[in-house]
Image (cartoon, helix red, strand yellow):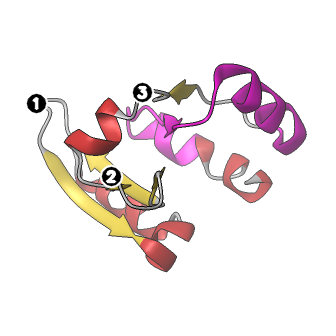
């Protein structure tokens, strides 16, 4: 995650907001953010409503699958990277650069 911090100016320049969301509790996220040096907001989806809505919750295993979504100002999903693709920020950078 620390590598992502170097990419933050790109998102700022493209008028984009980066948010992290997981089913972890707020205290768990706070510890994670401190450990990793994360400066963007982390949101808790403890009750898994958002994960279900976006179809990224694995109901059988009880956790959300790693996914990167780029959502435009109208709330329309413009890009989805899942699994190993979600580990790279390149796709989100490209998509956010095209949104105006």
Residue 15 location in percent, x, y?
38, 32
Task: Please name which of the two marks, 3 or 2, marks the residue nearer to the observer.
Answer: 3
Instruction: Examine the rendering and report whether any part of residue 96 can be seen.
Output: yes
Residue at figure coordinates x 71%, y 46% from the top left: 5
Q: Which residue is mark 2?
A: 69
Q: Which residue is mark 1?
A: 74
Is mark 1 in CB contact (under 8 Å) with mark 2? no
First to last magenta residue range: 9-37
Task: Please name which of the two marks, 1 or 2, marks the residue nearer to the observer.
Answer: 2
Q: Along the polypeptide, which appears first: circle 3 or circle 2?
A: 3
Q: Quadrant of residue 81?
A: bottom left
Horizontal side of residue 88 vs 59, given as left or right: right
The alpha-carbon separation of the residues under discs 1 and 2 comes to 14 Å
Residue at figure coordinates x 59%, y 41% from the top left: 9
Residue at figure coordinates x 52%, y 63% from the top left: 89
Residue 37 location in percent, x, y?
83, 38
Q: Residues within 10 Å of mark 2 (few under 14, many from 20)?
A: some
Residue 22 location in percent, x, y?
52, 40
């Amino acid at each position: 995650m620390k590598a992502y911090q170097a990419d933050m100016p790109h998102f700022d320049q493209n008028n984009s907001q980066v948010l992290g969301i997981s089913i972890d509790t707020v205290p768990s996220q706070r510890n994670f953010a401190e450990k990793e040096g994360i400066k963007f907001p982390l949101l808790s989806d403890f009750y898994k409503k958002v994960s279900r809505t976006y179809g990224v919750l694995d109901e059988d295993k009880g956790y959300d699958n790693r996914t990167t979504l780029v959502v435009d100002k109208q709330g329309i999903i413009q890009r989805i990277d899942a699994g190993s693709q979600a580990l790279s920020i390149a796709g989100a950078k490209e998509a956010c650069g095209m949104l105006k």
